Amino acid sequence: MCLALPAPVIELLPNGMARIALDGMSKEISLDLVEDVQVGDYVIVHVGYALQKLDPEEAVETLALFAELAKHS
């Protein structure tokens, strides 16, 4: 099973890369597949690539659901 996660962009880096915050850690990802990403945008991340931008409210709801699932697993 593959899982793509919403994450906020916390820094834009050279060469089409960005730093995201994910579960208390930061990770570098590629922005090659998504246009016009800015710091503060939420993106769906899968295997090191941003796949699309996501509405902030939807991202927060999705992250809350994942947190709730983690409590019950």
Image (cartoon, rainbow, N blue to C red):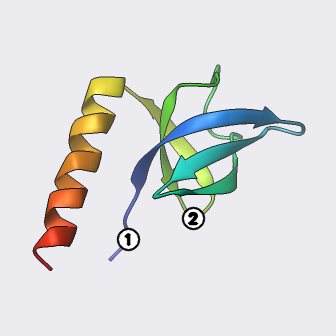
* Position of residue 24 measured from the top left corner of the image (x, y, whole percent): 51, 57
- Label 2, label 1: how many angstroms apart (C-alpha)? 9 Å
In the rendered structure, the answer to whether residue 42 lies left or right of residue 36 reads left
- In the rendered image, the quadrant that contains the N terminus is bottom left
| Of the image marks 2 and 1, the number of the one nearer the N terminus | 1
The residue that mark 1 highlights is 2
Contact check, label 2 and label 1, Cβ < 8 Å: yes
Q: Quadrant of residue 66?
A: bottom left
Q: Residue furthest left?
A: 72
* Position of residue 29 measured from the top left corner of the image (x, y, whole percent): 68, 51
In the rendered structure, the answer to whether residue 28 lies left or right of residue 7 reads right
Is residue 30 or residue 60 the one in the foreground? 60
In the rendered structure, which amino acid carries the disc numbered 1? Cys
Residue beneath the point at 29% across and 36% down: 60
Is residue 16 or residue 40 the one in the foreground? 40
Residue 47 is tagged as 2
**Is 16 placed above or below 67 here?**
above
